[in-house]
Image (spheres, rainbow, N blue to C red):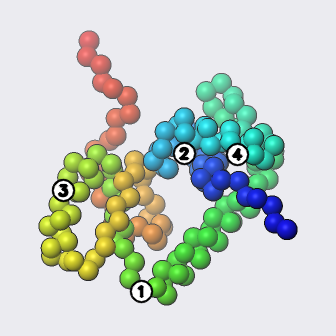
Amino acid sequence: MSERLPSLNALRAFEAVSRHGSIARAADALNVTAGAVSRMIKTLEDDLGVRLLEREGRGIALTPAAQAMVPRLQAGFNEMRGAIASLRKTSGERPLSVAVEPVFASGWLVSRLDSFRQVAPSIDVRIDATRAEPSLSDRTIDIAIDTGLPIISKPIRSS
């Protein structure tokens, strides 16, 4: 008899926090709010009955139990990525994946997709609108558009 697994989204959030070392950076990578990541971690801790993060002032640290879990969790996610990649190879064409900053995607790219579809109707486009810098080793991203402009995360105040 198998045990019920915790929420996959909560596990993803925890893995992202462990990889990025920050709830805010994990939230950016997952395109959710820091509050959502915090709630998912709390839900996961409650579900497992184990504390995973220690809050240290404005930072966090993984507990020993969390440190022991991270390699196996990352191996599991890598195994799932491999299974999905194999499935995509056998199922034919996969969508063209474009990683782009959200503001650029909504303000420029999305409005031009209809024109692209008229020229290339057989190409399915998947937009990965993220503030996280895409990794060059990420084989799920076909094209990354970098506007070259820094992202301002705090409002600019005038004196």
The CA span between labels 1 and 2 is 32 Å
Residue 8 in the figure: left or right of residue 26: right
In what element is the residue under mark 3?
Answer: helix
Q: Amino acid at mark 3?
A: Ser
Q: Nearer the viewer, residue 107 or 133?
A: 107
Q: Nearer the viewer, residue 2 or 79?
A: 2
Q: Nearer the viewer, residue 97 or 122?
A: 122
Q: Earlier in the sequence, mark 3 or mark 2?
A: 2
Callout 3 touching callout 4 (CB < 8 Å): no
Q: Earlier in the sequence, mark 1 or mark 2?
A: 2
The quarter of the rendered structure image containing the C terminus is top left
- Residue 25 makes an appearance in the image: no
Q: Which mark is residue 3?
A: none
Q: Which residue is mark 3?
A: 111
Q: Which residue is mark 1?
A: 92
Q: Which residue is mark 4?
A: 44
Q: Earlier in the sequence, mark 1 or mark 4?
A: 4
Residue 87 in the figure: left or right of residue 46: left
| Between marks 1 and 2 in the image, the one whose residue lies nearer the viewer | 1
In what element is the residue under mark 2?
Answer: helix
Q: Amino acid at mark 4?
A: Leu
- Location of residue 92 with respect to 72 vertically, above or below: below
The CA span between labels 3 and 2 is 29 Å
Q: Which residue is mark 2?
A: 26
Q: Amino acid at mark 1?
A: Gly
